[in-house]
Image: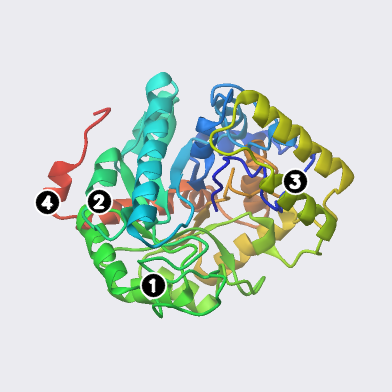
Amino acid sequence: MGYLLGAALLAVATGPSVAQDVPAVPAATQRLHDRLITLDSHLDTPASLDLPGWSILERHDAAQDYTQVDLPRMKAGGLDGGMWAIYTAQGPLDPAGYRAARDFAVMRGVSIHKMIAAAPDQFELALTAADAARIAATGKRIVYLSMENAYPLGEDIGLITLFHRMGVRMIGFTHFAHNQFADSSTDPSKTPRWQGLSPLGRDLLVEMNRLGIVPDLSHSSDAALDDALALSKTPLVLTHSGCKAIYDHPRNVDDARLRALAAKGGVIQMNAYGGYLRALKPNPAREQALRALNADRPAGAMTAAQREAMLAKRREIDRLYPETDPATFEDFMAHLLHALKVVGPDHVGIGLDWDGGGGTVGMRDITALPRITDALLKAGYSERDIAKIWSGNLLRVLRAAEAAAAPDARAAAPSEGH
């Protein structure tokens, strides 16, 4: 999903607000999980990198600072890496808005590169599908770059080259609102602007295909997905989505489109954002308190002291107005198992929306990831199936995008770490 504050500190969060006991998985399951390459296709964790006093190298507690991913927890949960998102909130569709978004996105990308440069023994930039296994074999965490919301590209498609050279290998067209490229599934107007992809969005798709960038249609409207399926020369990914058959929400996808996605070689990566997993009971007092906290956020970048004060207020909201009906791990598994039933293990993956509002009771941060492997084994899926779900399918789509890229685009790609 993505939040400007990093962790879902001030969001009307749907994940659990207090610590949860996570059942241990059998030792054999843990060993299996640890030997797989596990990738999450949508990590909003880059927003945490710019939080004052916060370090990716230190272990944090989701119940205290609301972050869900750091290096110690990656190791504990067996997460090898994934797509680290450059998320930019939707702003005005005008030159000033585009400039501000461009600058923000560039600096967020710089923050990710700084993370890698500061701990080269722990993280490595991945640029190709083949990099994942190589990096995992060294014990380092895998860092692919993605862009959530193409809005920072403005109306200059050529800017995509800048982000490609930075390492971006996947781009989502929209976020919560319509933009210059496509209709969003959740625009407040509830009225389509483009009836799918805009003319500029179609041009953007052509350029993604040329450069070998995977198109991400999460957050985009059903019509935009239809357009991309018809026009893209390479498979698509829904980096963090769910199934309409389980919960009929605009952010989720119906079975017919799941089959169409699979028919073109694409993958749906299953999301764990509670509000998209099932209908939740309203909690007006909590929502009002969180909105008030958001309104009180200091202007500009927060100091460490200001952030701690905001965290203390958020923890007090959790104490006074606890969630009454949070989504559960079982709700998440219902979506995952349904997608597997509809399109099979060749077209399903994991993209839980960590640090962007994802997480459920029983899976509040990445330390609980072995539960997914355990649940899949209990549902009858093989190690080979589970390996595809955790990374194989995503890497296959990335490999297909690379293979279809124009020769000049492959030649211009950066070679960091090679």
Residue identifier under label 4: 407
Between discs 2 and 1, the one toward the N terminus: 2
| One can see residue 168 in this view | yes
Label 1 neighbourhood size at 10 Å, few (<14), some (14-19), many (20+)? Answer: some
Residue type, numbered disc 3: Gly
Q: Residue type at mark 2: give it.
A: Leu
* Of pointers 3 and 2, the one earlier in the residue sequence: 2
Alpha carbon of mark 4 to alpha carbon of mark 2: how far?
Answer: 19 Å
Corner quadrant of residue 149: bottom left
Judged from this view, the residue extending furthest toward the left is: 408
Mark 1 vs 4, N-terminal side: 1
N-terminal label among 3 and 4: 3
Disc 1: which residue: 263
Q: Give how far apart the Cα atoms at labels 3 and 2 are.
A: 41 Å
Labels 1 & 4 near each other (Cβ < 8 A): no
Most foreground residue, 338 or 329 = 329
* Number of residues whose C-alpha sits closer than 10 Å to that of mark 4, classed few (under 14), some (14–19) or many (20 or more): few
Question: Do callouts 4 and 2 mark residues in contact (Cβ within 8 Å)?
Answer: no
Give the secondary structure at mark 2: helix
Q: Return the residue at label 2.
A: 159
